[in-house]
Amino acid sequence: MSAAGTGLRGAGVALALAGLVGTAVGLQVVRDRVYGEPRPERGFLYLQSPQTVRRLSLSYAALLADLYWVRAVQYYGGNRLAKEPNRNYDLLYPLLDITTTLDPAFNIAYRFGAVFLAAPFPGGAGRPDLAIALLEKGFRANPRRWHYLYDIGFVHYWELSDFPGAARWFEKAADVPGAPWWLRSMAAVTATQGGDRRASRLLWQVQLDNAENDWVRNNAALRLRQLDALDQIDALTEALRQYTARSGAGLRRWEDLVRAGVIPGMPRDPTGVPYIIDPDSGVVTVSPESDLYPLPVGPRATPRAR
Amino acid sequence: MILPAIALSVFRESVRDKVFYNLLLFAVILVGASLLVGQTTAGQDLKIIKDLGLAATSLFGLFIAVFIGIGLVWKEVERRSVYSLLSKPVRRSDLVLGKYLGLVFTLLVNVAVMALALYGLLGYVHLTTGEAERLAWEAPAADPALLIAFALIFAQLMLVTALALFFSTFSSPMLSAAFTFGLYIVGHFNADLKNFEAIVPSRPVAWLARGLYYLLPNLAPFEIKAQVVHGQAVAAGHVGLTLAYAAVYIAALLLAASVIFSRRDLK
């Protein structure tokens, strides 16, 4: 066959291939439009036992740990951003358990994982007990990492409002060789002023200043903004209370307060999202649309006298 | 001078068989992962890049060691080219050893290029990361300790190559691959054999299991990738003993392969 003939044949084959692949893509598009796109299975874990996964990993345990970690982050992020009200975080702990069994020194998996687990639903799994279990597992595997005990203290402080418990864990963290000196001060402050908003601010400021990476830093900054929001809500609630006492009328909309000149404009939280007033109770809080939602139950405002 | 000649011919054949295309795939995986990792996970980008680089080096090397190793001797016999080779002043043991050294050289080039590529990428990560973030790393990006992991990966691949070659002197490629992969897997479960008496009441069975523990290749000690990535110290004694173990085990396998191939009736 001549060179021109061979070239023509090659072009024909390439064209046929392109046509076939194009048709396959087209058929998929039509099928997806008619019958809906296939949804990836999110709430399923093929292998539940961390020990089994570890044994099957042969010499690739660390790499598998990375894959499970990526999956845990995606699972958490996907559920956090999902709109379905009946979503849950049931697989979060098993994923983190497998990750940390595959790689017992996976520092971030313990620390971030505990934050994901402890944060109240829907921002997190709302399972401080599992967060503590994960961090305890981390400390058993890495007895020099005082950070895990410090994080347990945070869970007690922030999610359980158990301030004596938090102080005890900060103290335990301070006992670990190589732990920083300020842990003892933190334990003392927590023991005496636990639940106080000023003490909380100190805790998160320390976390922000000593952040190992952007994620920890951003989380601490978010918590500080939540504390700012709590301060602002207290001020707004007081303004509301005074206005309703003065006018005798129930107030359920910010517009009325703005019109009355009590506040200069629509009050917004530190992320720029307007605060909302519960129409039934009149309680001021952050909007579910805000990154600050849900706000922690505590801590209480610092009394002026202090 | 016959050994280098045979080894070089194996290396050339590997190049002809486009074995080194896997390096291209390795580079794509590394660069792709480094771009993707930051988007899909929270923190630990450096750890994941290191894990991926070391695991890919080990995995690609394993496939090269097994799939080329099992055909080294078998192919010569099957093509009948072994007759022309053995008609020259070449001993059968030289052929086995030369083939082995050729594949080991191929693996060495492969591992060395992968190590260089990984160090290059880690150097880039180091340069593009701020000082504050670097302080939080468990180990420096271009950590020299990674070389220890590469050394043990290479030693493990040498051992697996010797296993594949050993089986290829008396078995078909399919069976050789099955045996080699089987032993590779068993090699990571050896600790169970040593502690068999904990689950089996029979003493003879427990002794047999313990005997197998010492007899079968123990690959678990070569596994220090995670330690190195986390910046944990690896005892020099452990590395030295593991390398010595690999050398002795390889010598035994090559000796056995040479004896079997020397006695094999090739008619």
Image (spheres, coloured by chain):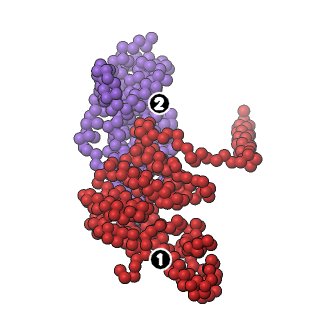
Chain colours: A red, B purple
Q: Amino acid at mark 1?
A: Asp
Q: Chain of mark 1?
A: A
Q: Residue at x 46, y 72 (%)?
A: A227
The answer to whether residue B164 shows anywhere in this view is yes
Give the position of the C terminus of chain A as an image quadrant.
bottom left
Please name whichever residue, B27 or A185, is drawn nearer the observer in this view of the structure.
Answer: A185
Residue A138's tag is none
Looking at the rendered structure, the secondary structure element under dot 1 is helix
Q: Say above or below: A283 vs B244.
A: below
The part of the image, by quadrant, that contains residue A12 is top right
- The answer for how far apart the CA atoms under marks 1 and 2 are is 68 Å
Picture coordinates of residue A32, whole percent (x, y): 72, 47
Is disc 1 in the same subunit as disc 2?
A: no
Q: Residue at x 50, y 34 (%)?
A: B16
Q: Nearer the viewer, mark 1 or mark 2?
A: 1
Q: Which residue is mark 1?
A: A231
Give the position of the N terminus of chain A as an image quadrant.
top right
Residue B67's tag is 2
The crowd level at tag 2 (other Cα within 10 Å; few <14, some 14-19, many 20+) is some
Q: Amino acid at mark 2?
A: Phe
Q: Chain of mark 2?
A: B
Picture coordinates of residue A274, whole percent (x, y): 59, 75
Please name whichever residue, B88 or B32, is drawn nearer the observer in this view of the structure.
Answer: B32
Determine whether label 1 and label 2 are within 8 Å by CB.
no
Picture coordinates of residue A56, whole percent (x, y): 44, 36
Q: Residue at x 39, y 14 (%)?
A: B264
Q: Residue at x 44, y 62 (%)?
A: A159
Looking at the rendered structure, the secondary structure element under dot 2 is helix
Q: Say above or below: A305 vs B184.
A: below
The crowd level at tag 1 (other Cα within 10 Å; few <14, some 14-19, many 20+) is some
Answer with left or right where residue A47 lies relative to residue B198: right
Answer with left or right where residue A32 lies relative to residue B176: right
